[in-house]
Amino acid sequence: MGRGSFSDVATELRRSIESGEFQRFERLPPSRTLAENLGVARNTLRAALIQLEKEGLLETRPRSGTYVTSPDQEVVVLTAVEEATPLELIDARFALEPHICRLCVLHARREDFELLDSLCSKMETAICDPVTFAGADTTFHRALALATRNDLLIWLISQINIIQSLDKWTRMRHLTLDEQIIRQYNKQHRETLNALRSREPERAAVKMKEHLETARISLMRAEEDSVANRMMA
Amino acid sequence: MGRGSFSDVATELRRSIESGEFQRFERLPPSRTLAENLGVARNTLRAALIQLEKEGLLETRPRSGTYVTSPDQEVVVLTAVEEATPLELIDARFALEPHICRLCVLHARREDFELLDSLCSKMETAICDPVTFAGADTTFHRALALATRNDLLIWLISQINIIQSLDKWTRMRHLTLDEQIIRQYNKQHRETLNALRSREPERAAVKMKEHLETARISLMRAEEDSVANRMMA
DNA sequence: TGATAATGGTTTAGAAATGGATCAAAATAA
DNA sequence: TTATTTTGATCCATTTCTAAACCATTATCA
């Protein structure tokens, strides 16, 4: 056969491992068996295994077997956090927050609305103060999660907030916060809160989506600008 | 000379324990008997037992027996999250997964569909095997997240999967998986995948919501049953 | 009480299976 | 063609399994 098949085998195995077909700590089938299953010669398989070992997905103990190395959970956290792009983060919030609004309609109590209301007021007095606004904004979205009374969602949102509070994010975020944007955000926060108060789950979800869409657009604009600046420099 | 079957035996036993075949505090069969049942030498079994003891799943008292202990599985950080209830978890998935489907339509590639397809097939052949089905099901939902190419979403889903893999969940989950439910899940998985393939984000999201709704209902029914059982006892 | 059985722990020698290495021939790509 | 890669086969060194025995302690029961 021609070339290329060894890297195809590596790709196939990599997918199997990443997709969880071979669990961590589990032993892969013996190279002879595995080669037969994959319809490939043992030598070819070996080349693929060596490749994957270099990548750190496998560990082979001679005369014992080839094992899936444990992907350290903490490493996953770090890479997920460090490599998350602003748009990925917005997409994640797009998934979570509209549904959080729906759940708020079911579970929020009077005191939750009071907290959300006071946070809106705080943001409305911070039109010229991006730092204060950003803090209150984070608190507002966190308060929405809290109002669901769902510990898991609260935790997920808090994880996202942790990422958002990293340095590189904070700076970019403050850049996007001009007075016009803050006014728009404030309007959307109010609209969302009103929909929640009148117990309209879908309207609240829609308002939240509009809010996130605004945030996405301003983020993209900020990125374009920073690219443009980099090109100017 | 060298096989690694002791690690395979450990995997098999781990499955038996997680599937509830061996209940907590229950004594395992004598090592001689168990070894014979597994078709493996007693020494090999012992190596596996020692491994599982290290993992904290078993406790062996010399001359008495080997007992299933409370598994301190996944000692991960999520202390607050460990107390998440099944319904909280379903709500979180309600938030994440429909939107993940929408993003899949944008980002999934051919090989993603192939993986999802093969997982559907695997689940369809596991109608009478809840343990295998549950594993493939988790992988399926993870594969959906992977197909979004959004590392943050992938991470969030993996966190949810970790919770779901905790011992107390696994048992309840397997209880809810009768043949009828599995057939329904399989149908819904297929429908979701088909919607993704034909690039219809909203239909995929709707199918996923239906799927999660089914899961929620069967969970609630299982909880009612367990409450009823407790009241009978 | 005392005898017997049952259990986990340990050791041993031999057998079986595994990954590692090499090489000539075949197949493929350029 | 020419160069490269895969294949299939064989041998090797070593690990790990098997099988069987024996030990020490506990449990059971007469």
Image (spheres, coloured by chain):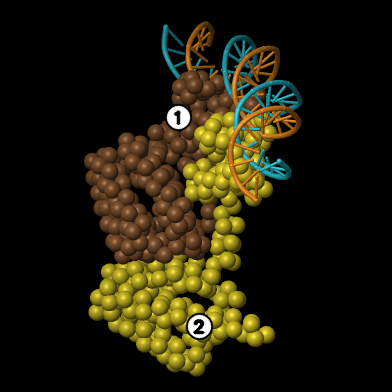
Chain colours: A yellow, B brown, C orange, D cyan
Residue pictured at 43% horizontal, 39% vertical: B18
Residue type, numbered disc 2: Arg
Asked which secondary structure carries label 1, the reply is loop
Residue D13 % position (x, y): 76, 26
Query: Which numbered dot is residue A224?
Result: none
The residue that label 1 is drawn on is: B27
- In the image, is B204 to the left or to the right of A11? left
B16 to B224, vertically: above or below? above
Residue A1 % position (x, y): 59, 39
Residue B69 vs residue A142, the one in the foreground = A142
Quadrant of image for the C terminus of chain B = top left
Mark 2 or 1: in front is 2
Q: CA separation, marks 2 and 1?
A: 64 Å
**Chain to which the residue tagged by mark 1 belongs:** B
Viewer can see residue A151: no
Residue pictured at 59% horizontal, 80% vertical: A227
Residue B73 % position (x, y): 50, 46
Query: Which numbered dot is residue A221?
Result: 2
Residue A221 vs residue A62, the one in the foreground = A221
Residue pictured at 31% horizontal, 46% vertical: B186
